[in-house]
Amino acid sequence: MNKRKAMISVLGILLIGGGSFLGTKAMFKDTEEVKHDLVVTTGSLELEVDNASPWRIVSEDSTEISNITDSNGFENVRPGDKFQKTITIENTGSLSQKLMIKEPRKINPDDKDKNFFEVKHNAIENIHNKILKPNESQTIIMTVSTKPEIMEKGKHEEVKVDLNEIVSPIIVEAKQLNDNN
């Protein structure tokens, strides 16, 4: 019986010791929610083109020689007449932009009736690879000159030409800058 009492005592001690160990060990758990607290608003990339200035008849040094302007065209144009228009490109977006110019090309270079005009602009010099910050602007001066050959080679009759039929538009492309220029 001694053995049996000893065995019961050992089992009792183990049960009491194990129970008290499990009973005193607390299993606490806590959960917290962490919010990101981040609101992202992208910047804008926007160009505005002011093409409203009228065409002007100008002299060789680009001073205006006539105040007779018509934004849609001129009549009785003579060889050597020169016309000018100012176009303004403005960055109305919130990001700095790098401007690229796609050079206009002659649409019908072989059309003899429409090859008496020379079209020039300073977009490549003034705007190509130019960085425009928000609210900055840059101008392009477009010049169209009648070549003296318009009255040569039997061309004494009236020639009517739409500039849009001679030269493709100037394409200004803007790409955002990812640095703080």
Image (cartoon, rainbow, N blue to C red):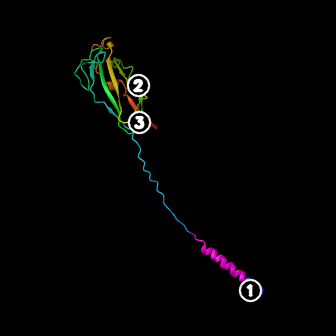
Alpha-carbon span between mark 3 and mark 1: 91 Å
| Dot 1 amino acid type | Lys
Q: Residue at x 28, y 13 (%)?
A: 156
| Dot 3 amino acid type | Ser
Q: Main secondary structure of the magenta part?
A: helix
Was residue 23 drawn as part of the magenta stretch in this picture? yes
- Is the Cβ of the residue at disc 3 closer than 8 Å to that at disc 1? no
Identify the residue under disc 2. 124
In this view of the protein, which residue sits in the foreground, 84 or 104?
Answer: 84
- The magenta-colored residue range is 8-27
Alpha-carbon span between mark 2 and mark 1: 107 Å
Q: In the rendering, which numbered label is found on residue 25?
A: none
Q: Residue at x 26, y 24 (%)?
A: 73
Mark closer to the chain start, 2 or 1: 1
Q: Say whether residue 70 is left or right of residue 123.
A: left
**Can I make out residue 136 in this image?**
yes
Identify the residue under disc 1. 5
Q: Position of residue 8 (x, y in %)?
A: 72, 84
| Dot 2 amino acid type | Ile
Q: What kind of element bears circle 3? A: loop
Q: Where is residue 104, by image quadrant?
A: top left
Q: Where is residue 56, by image quadrant?
A: top left
Mark 3 is surrounded, within 10 Å at the Cα level, by few (under 14), some (14 to 19) or many (20 or more) other residues, namely many
Q: Where is residue 67, by image quadrant?
A: top left
For the N terminus, the quadrant is bottom right
